[in-house]
Image (cartoon, grey):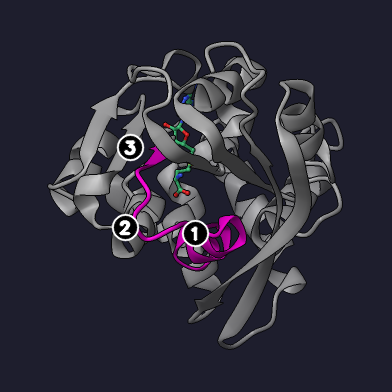
Amino acid sequence: MFTSPADGYDRFMGRYTQTLAPELVDAVGIDRKARVLDVGCGPGGLTGVLARYVGAPSVAAIDPAPQFVSTCRERHPQADVREGIAEALPWPDDTFDAALSCLVVGFMTDADQGLREMARVTRSGGVVAACMWDLDEGGMTMLETFWAAARELDPGVVGERMRVGVSRGDIATRLRAIGLRDVVDGALTARVDYIDFDDFWQPFTFAVGPAGAHLAALSADEQEQVRELCRPLLPDGPFTLEARAWFGSGVVSPTLPDH
Ligand SMILES: C[S@@+](CC[C@H](N)C(=O)[O-])C[C@H]1O[C@@H](n2cnc3c(N)ncnc32)[C@H](O)[C@@H]1O
């Protein structure tokens, strides 16, 4: 699902991370002296925002996709960027002051285990935070537009509504369930400017993420039909699309295992 080159990701979703990641970091309130971890870093959008706050040597990042790991390393050579998964983080207990994850929990094989691992590597009193697009109430306009068109062609299409974290309050509920305290449940807003409809459509053809994978599995004729079903849902000229993400954060308690 995330096997595409980093530049395709940048054109499709990385352009949203540019405004979402600063919102996430602001919502968490990172101390300038903090040591921080970016879980599911992709090509490094959030990694770069964290590096601007605390300095790249104080940032670690991890992702299972090798092409993203090498791009993230090239973009942030002073950060500790590793290949691996959230569910089995390769750092000792209490390594970080904060562990953040941007648009990742919904892709983890076991999101609760991933969040537990983020808490394990974060010191007592530190923060664990995550966000995922609102794919349940339609707050992520770009993906909502695509899935509405895909469903018009085939009403049986499920889309991404079943993913972890995409419904209101789900991330916060999971953070409470793993034993974090002072859990905050909120929403973040990102936005992207598009030159025209082609600027919106072309990145779907790069097969990035579930929407790109869905499109790639259709015939050429069906792909064209989805494209034409999207077109009337968007303005003609340049336009800006807003995207809401659900956000949750919580403080690591000394009573958690490994603390
Ligand atoms: C939508 S991208 C988000 C990338 C980046 N955080 C951003 O905001 O641009 C989802 C990322 O999650 C990664 N991923 C998938 N499963 C994962 C897992 N179990 N643990 C950590 N990362 C995972 C993918 O490789 C991909 O880079």
x and y percent of residue 146 in the render?
68, 53
Counting residues from the N terminus, which is met first, the one under dot 2 or under dot 1? 1
Q: Is residue 35 left or right of residue 115?
A: left
Q: Is residue 18 magenta?
A: yes
Magenta residues span 17-38
Q: Is residue 141 magenta?
A: no
> From where the camera sits, is residue 226 visible?
yes
For ligand 1, tell me if the residue under mark 1 lies within 8 Å.
yes
**Amino acid type assigned to the residue bearing label 1 in the image:** Ala
Camera-side residue: 130 or 108? 130
Q: Which residue is label 1 attached to?
A: 21
The C terminus sits in image quarter:
top right
Measured Cα–Cα span from mark 2 to mark 3:
14 Å
Q: Can you tell which of label 2 and label 3 is closer to the viewer?
A: 2
Counting residues from the N terminus, which is met first, the one under dot 3 or under dot 1? 1
Q: Can you tell which of label 2 and label 1 is closer to the viewer?
A: 2
Q: Which mark is residue 61?
A: 3
Q: Secondary structure at mark 2?
A: helix
Q: Which mark is residue 54?
A: 2
Q: Is residue 48 left or right of residue 79?
A: right
Q: Is residue 194 left or right of residue 32?
A: right
Q: Secondary structure at mark 3?
A: strand
For ligand 1, tell me if the residue under mark 2 lies within 8 Å.
no
